[in-house]
Amino acid sequence: MRTATRVPAISSPLPSRTPRSDRRTTIAGALLGFTGIGIVMSILTNEAVYPAARHYSTFANTISDLGGTVPPNSYMVQPNRLIFITTMALAGAMVLAATALLWRNLRPRRIVVGLGIFGAALVGIAVFPGNVAIWHPLFALTCFVAGGVTAIMSRRIFTGPARFFAVGLGTIALAATAAGLDPFANWWPQATIGIGGVERWIAYPVLLWMVLLGAALMTVGARSRIPA
């Protein structure tokens, strides 16, 4: 029986790979994949348990409203606030840990820098949740832009169709970031799906890209064989 080697979804991140570097890359991929999946599931759960009396809406409310609504008339609801802050803090820590593991392993290094900025911004969102003026919008915007730009830059390390998915997801996130700015509040798509809907068009593509990148990194070093 003939065998064929799988073509990896990601190009080799190391100039000279070793078993140790492959393990670090695999762990980093697991952290990124778990972060992407974990944030999505946390948001869905948090929305489901939000008190009906508060009328939380994915049209009118942003994801950050789960941790505290915007001032001056802010209100914070438990356990939603705790779930939001804990999720963002853990997610940021995992992305930063993945960044440290990939620092020597991944090229071009600007992708790792982008991941680091994204992770630091997630921690900033946890420290300064939605009820904190100035700082929260700053960290949220940094998170959105860093995520979208890094997704597009990551096309350099993917092979095959995966690179087009990375570019597409990053482009969607950046386009939605621009569409979600205050000057476009009365324009499409904000006027149609609300600021909450637009923000989810920013966050979910970035999170899907993180799962894609994480899954690809976890395959690095694997020597799979399939029947021809």
Image (cartoon, helix red, strand yellow):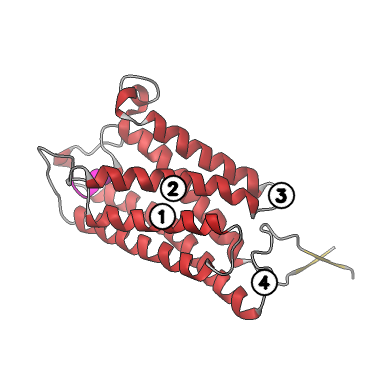
Q: Would you identify the image quadrant in which residue 106 lies?
A: bottom right
Alpha carbon distance from label 4 to label 3: 18 Å
Q: Looking at the image, is mark 2 or mark 1 earlier in the sequence?
A: 1
Indicate the quadrant where residue 94 lies.
Answer: bottom left
Counting from the top left corner in percent of width and height, residue 203 is at 40, 44
Identify the residue at image location x=45%, y=48%: 147
Q: Quadrant of the C terminus?
A: bottom right
Question: What is the crowding at mark 3: few (fewer than 14 residues within 10 Å), some, or many (at least 20)?
Answer: few
x and y, in percent, of residue 191 in the image: 33, 22
Work out whether mark 3 precedes mark 1 in sequence or the reverse, and give the earlier one: 1
Q: Residue at x 42, y 60 (%)?
A: 35
> Relative to residue 170, is residue 22 drawn left or right?
right
Kind of residue indicated by mark 3: Gly
Q: What is the span of residues highlighted in magenta in the rendered image?
A: 64-68
Q: Is residue 204 above or below residue 213?
A: above
- Residue 37 in view, yes or no: no
Judging by the rendered image, the residue that carries numbered circle 4 is: 221
**Residue found at the far right of this picture:** 1
CB-based contact (under 8 Å), mark 2 and mark 1 = yes
Count of labels in the image: 4
Numbered label attached to residue 146:
2
Q: Which residue is mark 1?
A: 117
At x 54% / y 60%, what residue is drawn? 214
Q: Out of 111 and 35, give the one closest to the viewer.
A: 111
Q: Going by the image, does 82 lie left or right of 75?
A: right
Q: Specify the amino acid type for callout 4.
A: Gly
User: How far apart are the two marked residues, 3 and 2, measured between alpha carbons?
Assistant: 24 Å
